Amino acid sequence: MANRNDFRERVDARYEQLSGAHRRIAEYILANANRAAFMTAARVGRAVGVSESTVVRFAAALGYPGYRHLQRALQEGVRAQLTAAERLELTEADEDAPEGVLERVLRTDMDNIRATLQDLQPEAFRRALDIIERATRVFVVGQRSAAAVSYYLSFYLSYLRPHVIPLDDASIMFERLVDLGGSDAVVAVSFPRYSRLTYDVLKLARDRGAARVAITDSVVSPMARIADVSLTAHTPMVSFADSLVAPLSVANALITALALRRRTETQRTLEILERIWEQNSIYLLDE
Amino acid sequence: MANRNDFRERVDARYEQLSGAHRRIAEYILANANRAAFMTAARVGRAVGVSESTVVRFAAALGYPGYRHLQRALQEGVRAQLTAAERLELTEADEDAPEGVLERVLRTDMDNIRATLQDLQPEAFRRALDIIERATRVFVVGQRSAAAVSYYLSFYLSYLRPHVIPLDDASIMFERLVDLGGSDAVVAVSFPRYSRLTYDVLKLARDRGAARVAITDSVVSPMARIADVSLTAHTPMVSFADSLVAPLSVANALITALALRRRTETQRTLEILERIWEQNSIYLLDE
Amino acid sequence: MANRNDFRERVDARYEQLSGAHRRIAEYILANANRAAFMTAARVGRAVGVSESTVVRFAAALGYPGYRHLQRALQEGVRAQLTAAERLELTEADEDAPEGVLERVLRTDMDNIRATLQDLQPEAFRRALDIIERATRVFVVGQRSAAAVSYYLSFYLSYLRPHVIPLDDASIMFERLVDLGGSDAVVAVSFPRYSRLTYDVLKLARDRGAARVAITDSVVSPMARIADVSLTAHTPMVSFADSLVAPLSVANALITALALRRRTETQRTLEILERIWEQNSIYLLDE
Amino acid sequence: MANRNDFRERVDARYEQLSGAHRRIAEYILANANRAAFMTAARVGRAVGVSESTVVRFAAALGYPGYRHLQRALQEGVRAQLTAAERLELTEADEDAPEGVLERVLRTDMDNIRATLQDLQPEAFRRALDIIERATRVFVVGQRSAAAVSYYLSFYLSYLRPHVIPLDDASIMFERLVDLGGSDAVVAVSFPRYSRLTYDVLKLARDRGAARVAITDSVVSPMARIADVSLTAHTPMVSFADSLVAPLSVANALITALALRRRTETQRTLEILERIWEQNSIYLLDE
């Protein structure tokens, strides 16, 4: 994850070299951080009284590959402090045509995966895989929107190894953990604003000495701090909610890598399931 | 989605221009389609007795931007006929290092989103949005792995409009649909191998005259054929399972676009939720 | 469960001894079995042209302790063939005052438990307990209304022993059973009209050699025929649906008996849960 | 529900008339309330040094129809203060034979229904029915073991009227309630030790002016105090957990009474469902 003060630090480091127009842009942004983080270059230009291309060159002068990167650095800095309602309020009104939103969201999700690939430590990925492969039992937890990722992960992990236990019913999850022990593992999916319940599950796992993998936004997130291994993924989205696309892609990678490690057993499982699916008409027949 | 016979058609159209080595590669691939679809350029080269770079140039000669694109065209052609077990068997054994898998999966997911952005009709997106906004009730259905996407979509849609009903319990979904009528809408998420149950729900919706949005892989999928609007997304993954990353990104786009259309109501809802979340300690407090 | 032809057999055996009025009642009932099964004594009397007390004495002449017992024998005979809509149509219109319904339903449920206590074989109960105690894993399945009982049973069983796995998501239950083996057990709750899915799970368990306990309506039900042990419970209810009160009471008995058998381990589990519940504010504090 | 100090009050009122042996029994019980509540007459006799029949006569001298009634009055008094682990510890060790447990549990459940029938106010039942029938939407909530009853109730209510919404996912139930208003109703099932989450839902309903029905143990329970109408049911069970059999029977009565009130619409719904069930092979075919 980008440093939350990345923009301020760059401005500080290069302030002396900045032109007058660039300094005015910098000052405007620092004074209106929450709002500016969600403004286009054109709009920042109008607010400051310079052209759009001046704003774009300003981003380059700070070392950002493009204005979009500057904008995302700003968003990283403010998102954690905003409520969902505030974030929606800040979203640009002049980009609302459905086609524009579609393109913007899908491009942002590609960027999120790209940034995830850059930041995620291969060593962490390997260790997470080891934990998931070797544990006696693997409990998978994610609440609210993150439940989409934890459900997907536990659905496929149950093809790949025995004793995968989804903690999918919030009202009885602690009962399922009553005999959690040192040979078990918990995989927790949680992004800002972190679910208190998921945190409590991870804390219990730590107290019991169980291995802990967090799929979260940063190695300094509350989840990461009580996990053994953190798989970090980028989730920024110019919307009232974050995007769980990159975390889902990381879940895909875990599933694929474990399937290859346990290729023989998995193939046997899949063949058994194939017969079961057929007997029970789970899928549409080919036409 | 790419035409399933795309590779064969290109070979047919350009066969006369192909060199002898290229013809041998083409023939090998056509004769071993299932296996070749999952082989690297180097491996195809070894099988045919030519160099890896000859195979890469062969892809270019057929008009593919790279070997990866040729490979994906082949995979499109065979995937539908393969069982999960067969697909796993065909996955390259020599790419199993976790780091390699991580990179390969995340890059494939980026490609999937990119291809989705190219193929998804903006007009279809706009019509899907209209249906979801205007229906009296919106039922959301997805089974098995697709349930991750349908859960995520219904979770956020319920912030954006009243009467969003997740069909999340397969054993009682038809009871929930008993009074489904012409002013309601059903959003169905289904990818190959299509769930029979999701198909049956969509068929019931058609019989009742309800509006139908399919999030699926192709405008000619069984789901698309009985839907009013299809949002197509790419899901190929070199693994035993497909990836639902691009469909999740499309769900993100629907959510974001609807939030912007219904900005005022959504903001009010989010403010109410904010107070409820706080009163019930749903999130971790900021540290 | 009462023999489905119990009424006819009694009439056949005693026909010669019946008075003319009693014969007319018998003939009316045999000719209108579906309807008569849900008529009061007074109403049968009006239909035949005799007094209510003559109908009550007729029941006694056939050896029933009361008219209610005759009526229930008739209901046993017809219920299996009626749809829910037909059953509702047959329900007495003149007993619709809420107070009357409340009393009638609660009394019928007491009768159901009493009849269950008479018919359930203690030996079967003991064997079911042995199976649930000794299995490596216990899978619990019940669909639709029976899911209330299977949920309750698996909720408490998970306090009493490890590896209790609720098959609570119909769309992925076969995946959870992929490695089901001879040391596992399946407990299935199913009453008429039996769920096809529950039956398929029990059949799979039989094919795998897993131990099978059915909580069902009769030792000759389709579920009982493929189970090792059947715990039978009475569910008749003068309504469009059967009552699952007696099966829930049987589930209570299983839970209580297992808690006493495993008293020491259970007490330890409960003490651990007590601390977890407190830490996580699961319960309201005493005022 | 019996007065929690019922035993003490009876002893106070009749102390002068009690024999010396009866006074010793009374004093022993008052001094060992928690333990004595779960002791048989024989065991109390041994502890005090009198015969079992003296203890039974003591119960009669206090006006209890039998020793069992005295014992239940004691249990009412202590249960609320005991943890599950303490209750299990107090359960008689000498009654552990499975057959004995089976009989004891089923008889206790019959007693629970009988006591429920005596105590539940018909007027409350009628008002609950009115609320459920007339509300724009009916939300049904129950957590943990009570979820068995709330699931069952919402399953059948959805046959009987539109817009029945089960709050079955604890992690997102407040989102479903975001637009809860004065024309809606909430039905909450909660027994000691009351779920905090269910209480919070009921409190939100009160703040929004929604109609509130509690299915709970007493008209003075925390749930009852913030409900418009309370349907009380008896749940005592000599086990580590309470029994939800009587509450389930009350749910049955609500369902049956509503089906009769809405007979025509319900019949139409059931006919539609019948066709759907058949088309989708929900039930086993008759053999």
Image: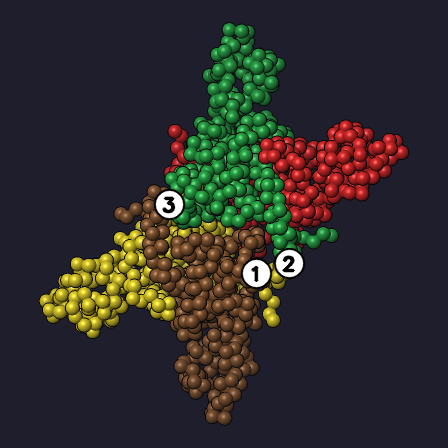
Chain colours: A yellow, B brown, C red, D green
Q: Residue at 48% of width from left, 51% of height from top?
A: A165
What is the secondary structure assignment of the residue under circle 3? helix
Q: Residue at 55% of width from left, 45% of height from top?
A: D157
Q: CA distance from mark 1 to mark 3?
A: 46 Å
Q: Which disc number belongs to residue B208?
A: 1
Residue C62: % across, % down: 81, 32
What is the secondary structure assignment of the residue under circle 2? helix
Residue count near mark 3 (Cα–Cα under 10 Å), binned few <14, some 14–19, many ≥20: some
The reply, left or right, for residue D102 in relation to residue D8 is right
Residue B126: % across, % down: 41, 68
Looking at the image, which is closer to me, D32 or A237? A237
The reply, left or right, for residue D38 in relation to residue B265 is right
Q: Which disc number belongs to residue A200?
A: 3
Task: Tell me which amino acid carries mark 3.
Answer: Asp
Residue B152 visible in the shown view: no
What is the secondary structure assignment of the residue under circle 1? helix
Task: Tell me which amino acid carries mark 2.
Answer: Gln
Task: State which mark lies toward you, 2 or 3.
Answer: 2
Q: Quadrant of residue C65?
A: top right
Which chain does the numbered disc 1 sit on?
B
Query: Disc 2 vs disc 3: Cβ atoms closer than 8 Å?
Result: no
Q: Which disc number belongs to residue D279?
A: 2
Task: State which mark lies toward you, 1 or 3.
Answer: 1
Residue A280: % across, % down: 62, 59
